[in-house]
Image: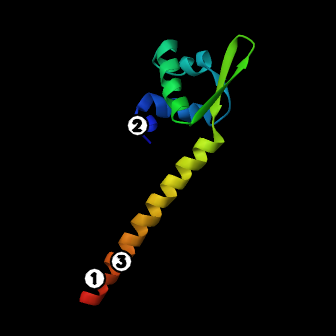
Amino acid sequence: MDALGHPTRRAIFEQLRSGARSVGEIAAELPVSRPAVSQHLRVLKEAGLVTERRNGTRRLYRLNPDGLDELRRYVEDYWTDALAAFKAEAERERRSA
């Protein structure tokens, strides 16, 4: 979750939803330099959200399905807990009314 806390990393993440892209392709859509994009990609890669593969002299980055599954499970667990707490509170209020 921390990796997606920065707006530039979220923008990169969103770009990669449509498929694999190079650093240059990503940077062309953002108001930051290619080296900055590379640094943000490194953070996303370390978080397990992005993978890279070489294609000749270029590196192509794409979303990591395994990392996305982990993120999805985290969010689902969060909502399950939040909804359970909401239900418990609603039932407590109903009993006290």
Vertically, is 59 above or below 1?
Answer: above
Query: Of marks 2 and 1, which one's residue comes earlier in the chain?
Result: 2
**In the image, what residue occupies the spot 35% across and 77% down?**
88
Residue 18, image x and y in percent?
A: 66, 35
Mark 3 packing: few (<14 Cα in 10 Å), some, or many (20+)?
Answer: few
Q: How many marks?
A: 3
Mark 2 packing: few (<14 Cα in 10 Å), some, or many (20+)?
Answer: few
Query: Distance between the Cα atoms at labels 2 and 1?
Result: 35 Å
Q: Is residue 45 left or right of residue 78?
A: right
For mark 1, give the secondary structure: helix
Residue 59, image x and y in percent?
A: 66, 18
Residue indicated by mark 3: 88
Query: Of marks 3 and 2, which one's residue comes earlier in the chain?
Result: 2
Q: Nearer the viewer, mark 1 or mark 3?
A: 3
For mark 2, give the secondary structure: helix
Colouring style: rainbow
Residue 87, image x and y in percent?
A: 39, 76
Query: Distance between the Cα atoms at labels 1 and 3?
Result: 9 Å
Vertically, is 40 above or below 47?
Answer: above
Residue indicated by mark 1: 93
Query: Of marks 1 and 3, which one's residue comes earlier in the chain?
Result: 3
**In the image, what residue occupies the spot 29% across and 82% down?**
92
Q: Amino acid at mark 2?
A: Gly
Residue 14, image x and y in percent?
A: 55, 35
For mark 3, give the secondary structure: helix
Q: Amino acid at mark 3?
A: Ala
Q: Amino acid at mark 1?
A: Glu
Residue indicated by mark 2: 5
Q: Specify the quadrant of the image occupied by residue 24.
A: top right
Vertically, is 68 above or below 80?
Answer: above
Q: Quadrant of the C terminus?
A: bottom left
Query: Distance between the Cα atoms at labels 3 and 2?
Result: 30 Å
